[in-house]
Amino acid sequence: MITDVDVAIVGAGPAGLTAAAELAADRQLRVVVLERESHAGGIPRHSDHPGYGIRDLKRFISGPAYARRLVARAVAAGAEIRTDTMVTGWAGDGSLELTSPRGRENLDAGAVILATGARERPRPARLIPGDRPSGVYTTGGLQNLVHLRHGRVGRRAVVVGAELVSYSAVLTLRQAACRTVLMTTTQPSPESYAVFNIAARPLLGAAVATRTRLSRIIGGPELRGVEVENLDTGRRRVIDCDTVVLTGDWIPDNELARCGALEMDPGSRGPLVDSALRTSRSGVFAIGNLVHPVDTADAAALDGRHVAAQVRNHLRGPAGPVAAVRILAGAPLRWVSPGLLRAGDPAPARHRLLSWTDTLIRVPTVTAHQDGALIGRRILPWAASPGRVFRIPAGLVAGHDPRGGPVTVAAH
């Protein structure tokens, strides 16, 4: 079976649903969203605490409420959402191979938007030694168990990480009547915003151990404790617990992008995109946490709004090839998104370059160099902190030479 659509969007999270609502508002376009889960909405669907919708909807609502609003907006605009539909590969430049309860089929699209998001690395990918008991989760696995399947967890938890998603895990544990006895981070200070760090002990009952790592998991068949090592002294101690939540350490869900031989950014491990969110494959765009793992849901959603105009331009007639200038990340930045600059392209979404730092810089000075010359310098009033996206004004690279070499963006 071959079906033709104008736009196929892979992933029904905030970015994909927002793109669908924007594009389907043009009733001449047939827009289809493909989602492997049984319900649309993405991660917010099982993140049952407030804090969603601030940037895009100008609301302060829970994750499930946010997901329902985005689904309703996309459907009301005229988008078709197909759940239980797995995109398994490519049948051509704009053709996707699908497997669903309807069987196997190919779907041909004038444009494809990849909005497959990101996930936390599980224990095997983190190479954590020790026993193999039950009771070890990622944040997503924990929230799925508690909020969607209404399952039970233990009573004493250790949370690995102290970034935004780590506090989301703590809130979920609290709702499940599980006390967080310790949060660990390898950083010298918690990675999250100060308001969360201040509230951790008095309001959430969670102590934060900085400059520490989880060195061993103990127990079998059920978890009995963990060993935590101080990175500065080498001293180890055992914490009694029956639940461990591994948070952060994000990687894009990039299997489909890699299968399509898209050029990848070695830093983010997502597709390399320009400020119009085009990938290296004509007619294929990538948005949200697939390209900047991982930002907040509402910031990812704004990529969906930004890409809509670029997709419409492509459908009116693909532009000819335009030379691109590569943006490289200089230490301590791990990656910069978008990673390409093209003459005539729009500014990035919200006029920001997004980046990730491996080192805390409280008052960062960011610089841009091209061919050995300084082309931009800014002192920013917000911190560059591990564990959350670092936003850099796009004007920093406005003075680049479109015919020059790569631009390196760094911070100190």
Image (cartoon, rainbow, N blue to C red):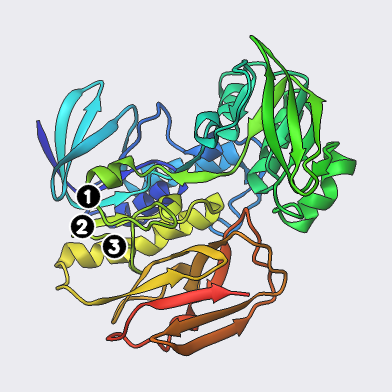
Residue 359 x/y as whole percent? 64, 62
* Label 2–label 3 contact, CB within 8 A: no
In which quarter of the view is residue 406 placed? bottom left
How many other residues sit within 10 Å of disc 3, few (<14), some (14-19) or many (≥20)?
many
Res 261 label: 1
Of the two numbered discs 2 and 1 in the rendering, the one whose residue sits closer to the viewer: 1
**Label 2: element kind:** loop
Q: Position of residue 301 (x, y in %)?
A: 47, 54
Q: Amino acid at mark 2?
A: Arg
Q: Residues within 10 Å of mark 1 (few under 14, many from 20)?
A: few
In this rendering, does residue 304 appear at all? yes
**409 vs 220: above or below:** below
Residue type marked 3: Arg
Label located before the other in sequence (2 or 1):
1
Disc 2 and disc 1 in contact, CB within 8 angstroms: yes
The C terminus lies in quadrant? bottom right
- Would residue 7 be found to the left or right of residue 125 on screen? left
Element assignment for label 1: loop
Tell me where residue 86 sits by quadrant.
top left
For this orientation, the residue located farthest to the front is 234
For mark 3, give the secondary structure.
Answer: loop
Pinpoint residue 202: horizontal percent, then vertical percent: 90, 42
Identify residue for label 2.
281
What is the distance, in whole Å, between disc 3 and disc 1 at their CAs?
Answer: 14 Å
Q: Residues within 10 Å of mark 2 (few under 14, many from 20)?
A: some
**Which residue is at the front of the view, 368 or 128?**
128
The residue at which mark 3 appears reads as: 278
C-alpha separation, residue under disc 2 versus residue under disc 3? 8 Å
